[in-house]
């Protein structure tokens, strides 16, 4: 993957440090080329998202999902001690893994299910009412009385 120099953007923007740090960390992490387990990201609605990971061979108790502020971590730890089989060919990867997903503000995990070797994690964005955009009504007519009083006092002082 190509390395991007974000220095010019850092110099001319204020308050985007977290975004630039996240982009640089993602570029470093993906530079290793480890794409296990494979996953899909999909938008299922205006404020709903889904992450689907292919975790063939893992049981529910071998997978851990941790959601904390702006970070979702999915870990899989396969217990190798219990399997004493002599494989002639081992093509299904069941190595331990850890996947991290950076989450935007107000995104929470709604549901997680393991079905037919696919781990599906449903996410939803819930913006608090106080932070949602508000439409301000424009009134017509005479200005407010407080503004009229301040204007008349200024004219009398002059």
Image: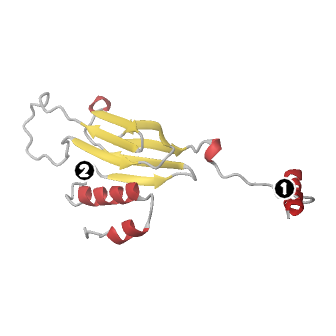
- Would you name the residue on which mark 2 appears? 36
Drawn side of residue 65 relative to residue 105, left or right: left
Which quarter shows the N terminus?
bottom left
The quarter holding residue 96 reads top left
Picture residue at 61% right of the left edge, 46% below the top? 131
Is 46 left or right of 51, judged from the image as shown? right
Question: Is residue 117 among the parts visible in the rendering?
Answer: no
Q: Secondary structure at mark 1?
A: helix
Decide which of 103, 50 is in the foreground and name it.
Answer: 103
Residue named by callout 1 = 150
Q: Which residue is at a point 27% across and 42% down the rendered structure image?
A: 56
Give how far across and how far down residue 62 sits, in percent: 27, 32
Rendered location of residue 79, percent (x, y): 17, 31
Q: Does dot 2 land on a helix, a strand or a loop? A: loop
What's the distance in space between the residues labelled 1 and 2, CA to CA? 68 Å
Residue 72's place in the image compared with 146, above or below, is above
User: Mark 1 or mark 2: which comes first in sequence?
Assistant: 2
Comparing marks 1 and 2, which lies closer to the viewer?
Answer: 1
Q: What residue do we see at 35% from left, 36% from top? A: 65
Give the residue displayed 11% in from the left and 47% down from the top: 89
- Residue 48 in sight: yes
Nearest the viewer among 25 and 96 is 25
């Amino acid at each position: 993957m190509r390395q991007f120099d974000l220095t010019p953007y850092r110099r001319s923007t204020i308050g985007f440090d977290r975004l630039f740090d996240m982009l640089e960390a993602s570029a470093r992490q993906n530079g290793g080329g480890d794409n296990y387990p494979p996953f899909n990201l999909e938008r299922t609605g205006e404020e709903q998202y889904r992450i689907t990971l292919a975790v063939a061979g893992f049981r529910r108790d071998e997978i851990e999902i941790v959601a904390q502020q702006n970070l979702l971590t999915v870990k899989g730890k396969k217990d190798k001690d219990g399997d004493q089989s002599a494989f002639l060919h081992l093509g299904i990867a069941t190595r331990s893994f850890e996947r991290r997903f950076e989450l935007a503000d107000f995104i929470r995990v709604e549901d997680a299910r393991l079905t037919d070797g696919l781990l599906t994690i449903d996410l939803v964005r819930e913006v608090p009412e106080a932070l949602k955009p508000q439409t301000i009504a424009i009134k017509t007519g005479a200005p407010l009385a407080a503004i009229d009083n301040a204007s008349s006092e200024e004219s009398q002082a002059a």
